[in-house]
Image (cartoon, rainbow, N blue to C red):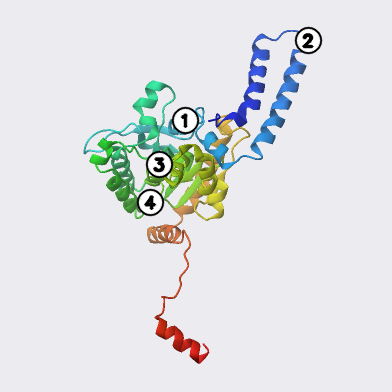
Amino acid sequence: MKDPRDFERPILELESQIENLTLFGEGQGREKELAALQKKLEKVRREVFSKLTPWQVVQIARHPQRPYAQDYLQALITDFVELHGDRFFSDDPAIIAGFGRFRDRPVCVVGHQKGRDTKQKIYRNFGMPRPDGYRKALRIMRMAERFRVPILTLIDTPGAYPGMDAEERGQAEAIAVNLEVMSRLRVPILVTVTGEGGSGGALALGIGDRVNMLQHSIYSVISPEGCAAILWKDATQAEIAAAALKLTAPDLLEFGLIDRVVEEPLGGVHVAPQEVYDRLGALWAEQLEELAAMDEETLLARRYEKFRAMGAFLETPPPQPAAARRARAKRGE
């Protein structure tokens, strides 16, 4: 199976040339050559990122250098105090939750957290929460409601952890309770998908008044590999599944499943993260002001209507007995 990030190879090769020239280049023509390479890199990035397939967007959403929840906290939240434990079993490091300030406004922040190196990835369980993580998130979101503090959630998970221990402790129940309670929390909730939005593990933090997605993030009922394994018994068909799932931000915006798409720089958010921090901060400020103007009953009613309106269905009349069809035909109906 070919490397799914092969489409980035021309970009990586140019970046390597620029790095080598910057570190080891000498002579009068060095600056001119650097400028030419930078210009070529910009052109290649534009060409590559103007025609991304859904499968390629999946690879960008999973990029190992993409900012995680802690990066957004450091960039956008001040005075953050993390809270731990679900008060039932343990503290799940795959979920970060606590209170801080966003532009001098008290907020509650809950997000999935992946790891950078092997040790951190194992500690964070690759961003896949167990039931303890969702119960911790719910405990802290209920605390936010008690103190009338708006909630910001950051979604970036392949999905809820499917291990035996998670199932034994009630993974499905924990997700279901989060969905039920978040739907009626009496404070504004802003949801932002920053990377992978995988299955119920993402949706457990995804019920809110405004749902935003970064341009190259994904949000889906199942991973492309999981979908391919179920439909074709072959996970290598993930590229086909990714196209069928309609999991990109533009697709979901068109279907009315999300509210806003936050533009990323060419190459993805990891290329120039501060640009995205600034855009996301401005969007959060705008949405919080809008929601703060609503009374609680209006807020809850509109949240209900938002999710109730999702999806489409077709009603058809019930089948008629053969005798009734023959009678209608005889009457010319």
Which circle's residue, 2 or 3, is located before the other in the chain? 2
Percent position of residue 135, x then y: 28, 42
Q: Is residue 167 left or right of residue 292?
A: left
Percent position of residue 331, x then y: 50, 91
Mark 4 to mark 3 CA distance (whole Å): 10 Å
Which circle's residue, 2 or 4, is located before the other in the chain? 2
Which circle's residue, 4 or 1, is located before the other in the chain? 1
Mark 4 to mark 1 CA distance (whole Å): 25 Å
Identify the element where label 3 is drawn: strand
Name the residue at 27% across, 38% down. Answer: 166
Residue at which label 3 appears: 107
Residue at which label 2 appears: 28
Mark 3 to mark 1 CA distance (whole Å): 17 Å
Which circle's residue, 3 or 1, is located before the other in the chain? 1
The three-letter amino acid code for the residue at tag 4 is Val
Q: Which mark is residue 71?
A: 1
Pointer 4 local density, CA inside 10 Å: few below 14, some 14–19, many at least 20: many
- Report which quarter residue 171 is drawn in: top left
Percent position of residue 309, x then y: 46, 61
Residue at which label 4 appears: 187
- Can residue 103 be spotted in the picture? no
Foreground label between 4 and 1: 1
The three-letter amino acid code for the residue at tag 1 is Asp
Pointer 1 local density, CA inside 10 Å: few below 14, some 14–19, many at least 20: some
- Between 3 and 54, the one nearer to me in the picture: 3
Q: Is residue 35 left or right of residue 283?
A: right
Q: Are marks 1 and 2 in contact (CB under 8 Å)?
A: no
